[in-house]
Every structure is written in structure tokens, then in C-alpha cells.
Image (cartoon, coloured by chain):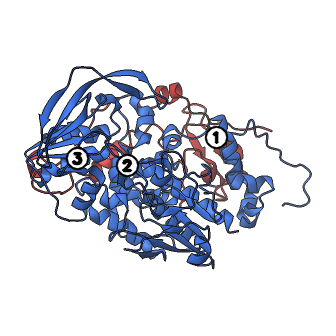
Amino acid sequence: MVEGRTHRPLIQSTRCHSCDVCIRGCPAELIPEYRKEEESLRGGLYQGKMREVARKGGVPLPPCQEACPIHQDARGYVALIAKGKFKEALELIREVNPLPAVCGFICHHPCEEACLREEVDHPVPIRLLKRFIAEHDRKRERPRKGLRKRREKILVVGSGPAGLACANDLSLLGFRVTIFEALPVLGGMLTVGIPEFRLPREIIKMEIDGIRELGVEMEINHPFRFDGNGRTLKKSGFDAIFLSMGAHRSSKLDVPGESLHGIFPGVEFLRDINLGRKVELGKKMAIIGGGNVAIDVARSTLRLGSKKVDLYYRRSRKEMPAIPEEVEEAIREGVNIHLLTAPVRMIGRSGKAVGMECIRMRLGEPDEKGRKKPIPIQGSNFKVNAEMIISAIGQRVDQNHLKGLEKNPDGTIHVDPETGKTNLKGIFAGGDMVTGPGWAIDAIAAGKRGAKAIAEYLT
Amino acid sequence: MTIFVFRISKVDMTKECKKETVQKIKRKTLSVKARRKSFSPVEYGLLREEAIKEAERCLGLRECQYCEICGLLCPDLCITRDEKTGEVLIDLDFCKGCGICASVCPKGAIEMVLEEAK
């Protein structure tokens, strides 16, 4: 550090609020090597160590940034948009977000919920602003400094938001990254789980092309499996593996008659539609579930030509996990939503489903996740007719290829929450396969955490 | 040693910033009839003017909040505040263009621009 000084600056971490004024004002900052000295004060500050300390005390970030899982500087880019500096705004977004256009379309925007403007009138539409910026300038360059300067090869399994975010960050750090995707299309749940009317395919393609330009190799139709003896990593020829295979198996309804013809699992149904495969369709559809998959299935079937679409959910509207705006749009499009209703039995005639028996529910005490538990009202059974029934009550992780990994009781992979490390050395995991079905932005955050942890592991 | 602390509290933000309320812009979407026919995107994006207007509503906008940190850190002491009007003045004859003020401004309200040759 600086030689020949008489005084030494001392920062009290309890009082430091990481305003960064000292760093930004420091004339010695012109010598960037100092930033790397981790044990020195400046290095520590520069690498955000103080910020992590301060964040635990809970002060400095603006509420929108604090609410975002990847701590995107929403206030910063909104301000740049207000000044008309669209290029700079996109650069600022790109600093932390590898998939801005995707987020602009489908993010569930926790930033807007946290926005302080709500106290005055209504929150700033941060998601739409991000979408505007991402669409405004489609042919922008990504930073390409220092690409492929490292020799280590890293495998990312699955090309969903978590995998893409991880691959993006790792290749920016200079690693050689390869993505294996089991499906014939890239994008994971973004492509096969979200219908085109919510997220146009060219937007996903644009983002993936951008990441491919960073030197990431992507192989489709390339499944990956663990052989159970813990030597998968060595055999694969890669130095580290990031698993982000997602949760692509529909949960079972667990009611009698589920195996009848005409009852389909929601995600698989949606995947077939999104891959352009031919799906069976009835005039009268019944959909079970209240999440995004259920709403997406309902809206897709309406577009494919079903005349009557009924959606059954066992809790009330407030407990629905789907994005409220999407639920509203679904109602506008003509989806009938029946709340506090759950199926108890599927009715079939000569092997084909013709309807189901439902029961009314009431809400009881909140469970450990804070959602009110539905309790069946005895004797309130009734029958509904339907030509096809689709159950979209949640997804599980496909267990077939995951021998030897430590798992949670619900089938998700057990990892260290800070780094995404699994029980096997050199293998990291993130996204839906760790948390269970969740939001894209959380998966992106997990991918970024994984990339950071892999970079640390390999140095 | 002085430590500068920026705290943003809910009360301060809403009290100090623009109070006028704006009607919520109705989200523009594809008509329900057209949706039945295709999988084209339901939601329309913002137009340029709309985006700027919406962005201007952010309470944390990069406007000078008269924190005077730039004045305190200026090595040439050329940033002062007009006692009467409260306006921040930069004495450009003394300014060496080191850029510290622009980099320390917590609101990003100071911008460094290239000087034209005389």
C-alpha cells in the first residue's frame, strides 16, 4: 500500500454503511493493483466485503435493489432511462443480469413490490422499463475482455436461467464453459415451460445467442447422468460441474383414477405445446392447480381452441402462487377459476376420463410456509364434467440421472445455500433442482452464486 | 474522522421528493379476441416517451440533493454553495478536472464532460 504516510485510516465496520465514498474519492484508486490486496482495507472494501458486513446490519441498498435476488441496481438504470441514456442503462443492467430481456418479460418483479413510490401513488413499472431497454437496442455488444484466458473447463448441465447465468458469469471470468441440454431446444423452462405469448421465442434466442458469443459451447439433445460411484466428474473430463437440470416432472395428484386416459400432467403438456408437438385437446378442459403452470396451461388451451376452460384451486385467490397479473389476464381471456375446490376422485367411462368429483375446502391455520392450509368440508362433494383433465399441482426433480448426490426429503438436491456445493467434490447445483419450482430470477441468482463458488473452487 | 452516512428512510424519501400523483398507465395488451387466434405476445412494451415518463417517477432519481459531499472532497475547494439561492456552484477557473466530485456524488448528479478547445 501507500508508503511514507503518517496516519493510517481505520474503518469501524459497525459504523461503515458502505457508501463507497472513500473508495471512489481515493486518488490512489488510480492504481488498480491495490484493489486485489484482499487483506488490506482498500482491497476488502473494493471486493465488497464491507458491504456484506453492512448488509447484515440491514442498511444501505435501496429497497428495490435489496428486494431483487441478484441485487440489480434498479434505481440506477431507471434514473438513466429518465435521462434518456438507454445504452448506459443496458450496460448497467448487464453488469449483474445475464438475461435482461427475459427478466423484462417474465420476472415476478419483487422490486416493484418494494418500490417506495407506492406510498405516493403506484410503483414504478421497473419490469416494463427493463423490457423497454432490452428491446430498444437489440444489437448491442457484450463486453468481451479476458474471455478464454483460463484453461479450466466447466460443464453446465441444463440451459435454463440458472445454467445460462452460471455459464455467462464463468465465461466472463475466462473459463471454458460447455452446456449440455437434454431437450432439443435451449432455454430450459423458459422455452418449454413458459408459453410463447408470455415470452416470445426470439427474445430467448437473442439472449442465448449473446451468451454463445461469449464462447460458451452449447450441445442440445445431450442428456447427462451420474453413475453413482462418485467418479462422474473425473470421467467427464471437466474440472467442475454445475447442475441446473430444473424440476421437470409433474407431481402426482394422489387421487383414485389418476391413470385414466385423458388425464395429463401439466408441465409435460406445456412442454409438448411449446415444442410444437401435437397434443390431445378437449372442448371442455379441467385444470387443477393455482400456480404459473396451471394458468399457462389454461391460457394455452384456450388459444388452441378449447371452448370451456375451468381451473380448480384448493385455496383462495390470495394464496395462488401464480403472478397476480397473469391470473387477471387469464380471467379476462375467459378462464373460469373455481377457488377452494379440490378433486377427490376421477370419474372414468371405459378407461377414459369424463369428469371428476370435487370437494369444497375452507382455509384453516397457516402452515410453516405461512400459507393457509385447506381443510375439506365434509359432505360438500359435487361432480364436474370434463373431456380432459390436466393436473398442474407442482413439479418434482427427475431422480433418474442423479445417483450418488445427497438429496432433501422432497427430492431436491441438498447443497450449501451460500455456494451451491453438493456432497460430491467439484460438483455444484442451483435453480429449481435445489429449491423446487421457483422464479426465474431466483434461478439466475443461484447460477451466479454457483459461478462465483466454482471460480473460488478452481483458484 | 468523519464518516458520511446515507440513509434512505421511507419518511424522508416520500416527503422530500415529488409529491404529485400520477394516474397509473393502463397496461396495453392484445385484445382478447386476437389472443384466441395465436400465441403472439399479450403484453405490449412501453414506448420511448412513456418509458422516460415512468422512469422519472422514481423517487431515487439522480438529482442533486445538496448533500455537499462534492464540496467537502474537492481538493481545490472550488465547489461552493450560494448562501442565498442554495445553488451548488463549481468554480471552473480553479477546477483541475480531477473528477472526484463526479465519482463521489451519491446521486450521480455530476457529470464530467470534455472541455472545448479555446
Label 3 belongs to which residue? A390
Q: Colour in which chain B is shown?
A: red
Marked residue nearer the N-terminal end (1 or 2): 1
Q: Secondary structure at mark 3?
A: strand
Q: Secondary structure at mark 1?
A: helix
- CA separation in Å, label 3 and label 2: 13 Å
- The amino acid sitting under disc 2 is Gln
Q: Whole-percent x and y of residue A103?
A: 38, 53
Marked residue nearer the N-terminal end (1 or 3): 1
Crowding near pointer 2: few (<14 within 10 Å), some, many (20+)?
A: many
Q: Chain of mark 1?
A: A
- CA separation in Å, label 1 and label 3: 44 Å
Label 2 belongs to which residue? A395
Q: Chain of mark 3?
A: A
- The amino acid sitting under disc 3 is Ile
Q: Are the residues under badges 1 and 2 in a single subunit?
A: yes
